[in-house]
Amino acid sequence: MRIGELSRRTDVSVRLLRYYEEQGLLHPVRRPSGYREYQEDDVRTVHNIRTLLGAGLSTRTIAALLPCMVDDGQMLVPACSGTLSGLQRERERIDRAVADLQAARAALDTLMTVPLPYDTAGTEVCHAVSEPVPAGFDTVLRGADG
C-alpha cells in the first residue's frame, strides 16, 4: 500500500509517517518510481508507535523496542529480555508523572473550592494582590462551564 492509504488506515498524517521513517521506526520499500510501499504489518507498527509515544517513550527508545515486539505488540521476544529493565524505568517515570499531575489537580481543586472574600461593594477581592479580582477571572479559573 502507498503512504496515503497507510495514513487513512492509521489516522496518522503523511508528514508524520515520513517522520517515523526518518527516525527509523518504519521501513517502507522504495519502488523504482520513488514511491514508498508499505506492508499490512506497518498498520500495526504505526499503532504500536502511537501507543509507545503516548506512553512518553522517545523515538530512539521505540526504534530499539519495535523489533522486539510480537503478537501485535503484546509480547517481547525472549532475545529482548534486556529491554525489560528499560521499560521498568519508563514505567516508574510515568508513575512519577501521574503522581505529579494528580497533585497538581488536587491543588487546583483546592483553589477552586475556597471562596474568595468580598469587599463592602460585593466585589471579589484577591488579597494576594490587594486588588479586586478582574471581572470574569473566576470563570477562567473554574472553566466556562463552571
Image: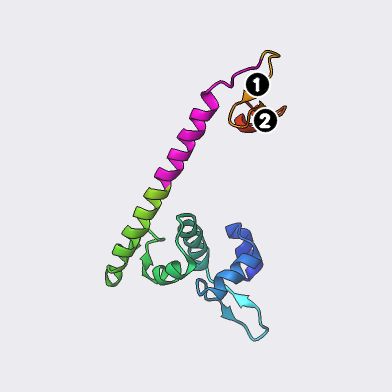
Decide whether residue 109 is among the magenta residues. yes
Q: Main secondary structure of the magenta part?
A: helix
Q: Which residue is outermost to the front?
A: 130
Asked which quadrant contains residue 33, the reply is bottom right
Residue 129 percent location from the top left of the image: 62, 32
Residue 1 percent location from the top left of the image: 60, 70
User: Which element is circle 1 on?
Assistant: loop
Between discs 1 and 2, the one toward the N terminus: 1
Q: Are marks 1 and 2 in contact (CB under 8 Å)?
A: yes
**Rendered position, 122 above or below 84:** above
Residue 104 percent location from the top left of the image: 47, 39
Q: Residue at x 49, y 62 (%)?
A: 49
Decide whether residue 100 is among the magenta residues. yes
The residue range painted magenta reads 98-119
> Which residue bears the numbered disc 1?
124
- Tag on residue 137? 2
